[in-house]
Each structure stands twice: as C-alpha cells, then as structure tokens.
Image (cartoon, rainbow, N blue to C red):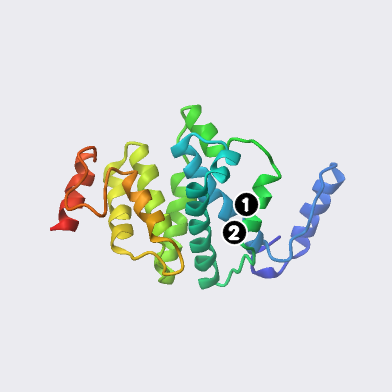
Amino acid sequence: GEPGRRNTARARDVAAAFGSAGFETVESPFIEKDFWVKLLGNVSFNPVSALTLGTADRLMGDPFIKDYMVAIMRECLTIGRAVGVDADIDPEARLDMARKLGTFKTSMLQDMEAGKKLEIDGLLTGTLEIARKAGVPAPFTESLMGLIRLHQGRPADALPYIERALKTAAPADLNASLFDRAMFALGLDLNAKAPAASAPAEVTALAERRWA
C-alpha cells in the first residue's frame, strides 16, 4: 500500500512481483492503519519483553504486565486517532493476534540477547514525538521509555521521559496503580516521602525535586 489511501500502479506492480515469486501478497487500501495495528504490538511487547526477559506468552500471562501493555496500546490508539489513523482494533483483539503465535521472543529481546542496539528510538521516541505534537498525554508510554533507557544505561536520556510521566496523571479510566508499579520498577515509591534507597542517583535527584 501507499500513504494517503491512494494506491497507484507502483503498489500494484510491487504486489504482483511478490505474488509471481510465490509470496502471499495483500494490497492494503489503508496502509497507515495496518502499520498502526503492528505498532500497537511492537511498542508494548518489545520493550517490556526486553525489560523482563519474558516471552510473549509469559507477558500476557501476568495480569499486571498485561494490563500495563494494554494501557500503552490504548495510548497508542489515541495518538493514532489524533493524527487521522484509527487502527480500529481493541487491545484484547491485538493480544489475541500475539497469542496465535504461541511462545516466542520479540525481536527486541533477541537483539538484547545478541548484544545488539535496541530499537528504542524507532519504536518509542517516534511515537512519543507524534503524541507531543498532537497534544496527547501518554504517561504509560513515557514511563516505558524511561524504563528501557535506564535499562540500557542511558539515564540522562531517560530522565526527561520519566519526569513527564511523573507529572502526567494517569487516564481516569485506567488503574493508576499500574503507573505506580512502573515507577516503582525504577526504584521510586510514589506513596513515600523520600526516594527508595535502591534508586539510581539520577532518579533519586529527580524524585527529590518531585517531593520538594
């Protein structure tokens, strides 16, 4: 498919070439929608799997992790709709797509195990840039960005995302404790009056400013 829902002969020629080579090919009338459906899974499953070292079935099998990923998917759906792309899929249906694949490691988890650079910017930075330009709050996705960047030893890059996530209230229709748990994974107890002793120095400084 081509952007703008206007497939030309170029797209049809590419589809025909793949088809003649024996590949099953589908010409998409709305490629942006298909892209966004894929993004919902990638932006949630990939970083979370790298953080937890869990296969997809284990991520979905843990109710806390599953709810966290669903919250991220809902934010991504809202971001897409704000820029004219409605993926038109419920997060549970997107999870069902992953369930059909059985036990598997995400590409990001495989990259991490192989010592390769993770696609953090391609998945999360771009999505959050769109969110900011569209004026869509995305605290769960922001927190995931902070978590994965800290995990990769990039605390200076992570802090702006953590700070925005901490300042943004979780959507009213979601369980705010999910957000608290994500921040606790950084060594922060949002209900405490001081940073957790195990928090990294950079995060401790940020927390002290928050509680000041």
Viewer-proximal residue, 17 or 99? 99
> In which quarter of the view is residue 85 placed?
bottom right
The type of residue carrying mark 1 is Leu
| Whether label 1 touches label 2, CB < 8 Å | yes
Q: Position of residue 79 (x, y in %)?
A: 50, 66
Q: Position of residue 139 (x, y in %)?
A: 38, 60
At 85% from the left and 42% from the top, the residue drawn is 22
User: Dot 1, how many residues are within 10 Å of its Cα: few (below 14), some (14-19), or many (20+)?
Assistant: many
At 71% from the left and 60% from the top, the residue drawn is 1
The residue where tag 2 is placed is 91
The residue where tag 1 is placed is 95
Q: Position of residue 58 (x, y in %)?
A: 56, 39
The type of residue carrying mark 2 is Pro
At 81% from the left and 44% from the top, the residue drawn is 23
- Disc 2 is placed on an element classified as helix
Q: Position of residue 105 (x, y in %)?
A: 58, 35
Quadrant containing the C terminus is bottom left
